[in-house]
Image (spheres, helix red, strand yellow):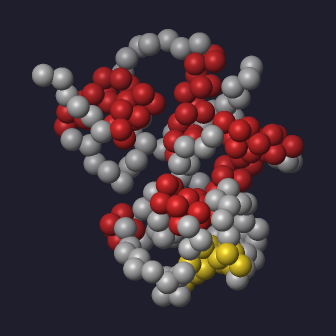
């Protein structure tokens, strides 16, 4: 009998690492993932860059190739290390901030909140989930029956670069993130066109 895996496990097996640390794996799922990680399969340079691209985009809610290309071009133009600039730009997105603060259980839910006009940016309704926040931006959410996600209750540690008021359902973006937690370590910005 063939085991059936959820889409999350299938994606984790394809990427070679567990991409959602908030969900526990069963014993069979963990063994399947270990066997994929420990396999000695060689990849080409393009294959390595593609895998790094897929890992990064899966962490940030499945970015499209065009959005990713725009972000990498902006990261290369900015002074400093390009991979650090890219992570700063990804962490400054409004959907990332909503997810990191626990207002959304997933990146998909964060994008849905923004698309359905539940989010206000500096007092005006905002519908672009890829908007890069600037220091001093005030984001508020319309009153709704919000429940704090279980992973927020177990690890209530919002980012220090954002001031949060959970009672009023609003937060202020103070400065770019100084510490970024990723499940995979980036060697460099993966570029697909080479």
Nearer the observer, 12 or 3: 3
Quarter assignment of residue 134:
bottom right
Quarter assignment of residue 52:
top right
Number of numbered tags placed on the structure image: 0
Q: Image check: 141 left or right of 29?
A: right
Name the residue: 85% across, 48% down: 78
Residue 154 rendering spot, x and y as whole percentages: 33, 68
Residue 56 rendering spot, x and y as whole percentages: 57, 40
- Residue furthest out toward the front: 116
163 vs 8: above or below: below
77 vs 97: above or below: above
Q: Image check: 38 left or right of 94?
A: left
Name the residue: 32% across, 51% down: 23
48 vs 163: above or below: above
Quarter assignment of residue 46:
top right
Residue 93 rendering spot, x and y as whole percentages: 66, 59
Residue 190 visible, this angle = yes
Report the quarter where the N terminus lies: top left
Report the quarter where the C terminus lies: top right
- Residue furthest out toward the left: 1
- Residue furthest out toward the bottom: 168
Residue 144 rendering spot, x and y as whole percentages: 45, 80
Nearer the observer, 98 or 27: 98
74 vs 12: above or below: below
Name the residue: 81% across, 45% down: 74
Q: Image check: 120 left or right of 42?
A: right
């Amino acid at each position: 009998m063939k085991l059936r895996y959820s889409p999350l496990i299938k994606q984790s097996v394809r990427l070679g690492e567990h991409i959602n640390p908030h969900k526990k794996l069963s014993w069979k799922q963990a063994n399947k993932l270990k066997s994929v990680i420990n396999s000695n399969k060689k990849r080409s340079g393009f294959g390595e860059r593609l895998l790094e691209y897929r890992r990064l985009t899966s962490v940030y809610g499945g970015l499209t190739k065009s959005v990713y290309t725009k972000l990498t071009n902006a990261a290369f133009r900015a002074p400093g290390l390009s991979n650090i600039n890219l992570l700063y730009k990804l962490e400054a997105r409004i959907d990332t901030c909503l997810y990191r603060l626990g207002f959304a259980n997933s990146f998909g839910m964060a994008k849905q909140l923004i698309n359905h006009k539940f989010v206000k940016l500096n007092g005006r309704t905002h519908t672009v989930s890829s908007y890069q926040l600037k220091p001093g931006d005030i984001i508020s959410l319309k009153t709704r029956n919000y429940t704090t996600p279980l992973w927020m209750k177990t690890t209530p540690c919002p980012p220090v670069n954002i001031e949060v008021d959970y009672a009023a359902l609003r937060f202020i973006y103070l400065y770019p993130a100084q510490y970024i937690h990723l499940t995979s370590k980036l060697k460099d910005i993966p570029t697909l066109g080479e």
